[in-house]
Amino acid sequence: MARRPTRQAILDAAITVAARRGITGASMDEVAEEAQVAKGSLYYNFDSKDALFSEVLRTGFTRLVDTVSAARTGLTGRAALRSVAVATMTLLQTNPELAKLMAAELFRTDRTWGDALAPIRSDVAVHFRDVLREVRTEQGADPVTVTGISGAALLGALAVASLDWLLFHPDLDVQVAVDEVLVTVGA
């Protein structure tokens, strides 16, 4: 039973350390110290630094997929787009350290966990693509012209805009920040 709280403390500490130093600069010693656990506990829960950060990112992106999917429920077109954008930016607002880490790792292909994260990243992009297709349909345009690249572009725009909002415009209401992003996609 004690493994779950320790594991979560390690994941949280890894996010904090990586936000401060980057994944490359993060050390397992520093993560253990931040989590206030023995280094043996760290390695009991995660075989390696790569395994630890793979889990951090997998968990973060899975949470994003679940958030986007829930935000679309019962909505289509512009209403779904707005809901997905608000949900995404609100999720990233709740954990800016994880948001920085996810944005930094979103399109990296040189990491050992890149292959494992590719399907999850693709799943997020597909959700965004599908919402953009619905908007195109509402506009009377051909939705097939909206591809996975469009979904990835919206994901990237929301990730970067979220960081800009959190770092430089934290007093701005999420709805206003979303409006700023949606103007870039013509919605």
Image (cartoon, helix red, strand yellow):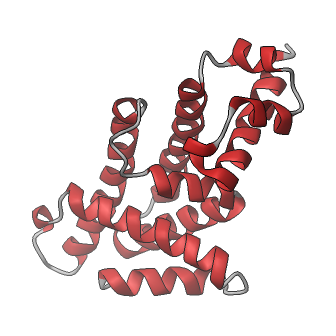
Q: Is residue 174 left or right of residue 8?
A: left
Counting every numbered tag in the picture gives 0
Expressed as whole percent of the image width and height from the top left, the position of residue 11 reads 71, 35
Which residue is painted at 21% across and 81% down in the image?
139
Give residue 76's quadrant in the image: bottom left
Which residue is painted at 75% across and 21% down in the image?
42
Taking depth in this image into account, of 57 and 134 the one nearest to the observer is: 57
Which residue is painted at 15% across and 79% down in the image?
140
Expressed as whole percent of the image width and height from the top left, the position of residue 41 reads 80, 16
Taking depth in this image into account, of 144 and 11 the one nearest to the observer is: 11
Give the quarter of the figure containing the N terminus.
top right
Give the quarter of the figure containing the C terminus.
bottom left
Which residue is painted at 76% across and 30% down in the image?
29
Above or below 9: residue 129:
below
**Residue 125 visible in image:** yes
**Residue 68 visible in image:** no
Taking depth in this image into account, of 142 and 88 the one nearest to the observer is: 88
Above or below 40: residue 176:
below
Expressed as whole percent of the image width and height from the top left, the position of residue 132 reads 29, 67
Q: Is residue 149 left or right of residue 27?
A: left
Expressed as whole percent of the image width and height from the top left, the position of residue 149 reads 22, 59
Give residue 89's quadrant in the image: bottom right
Above or below 2: residue 104:
below
Q: Is residue 147 left or right of residue 53?
A: left
Above or below 36: residue 160:
below
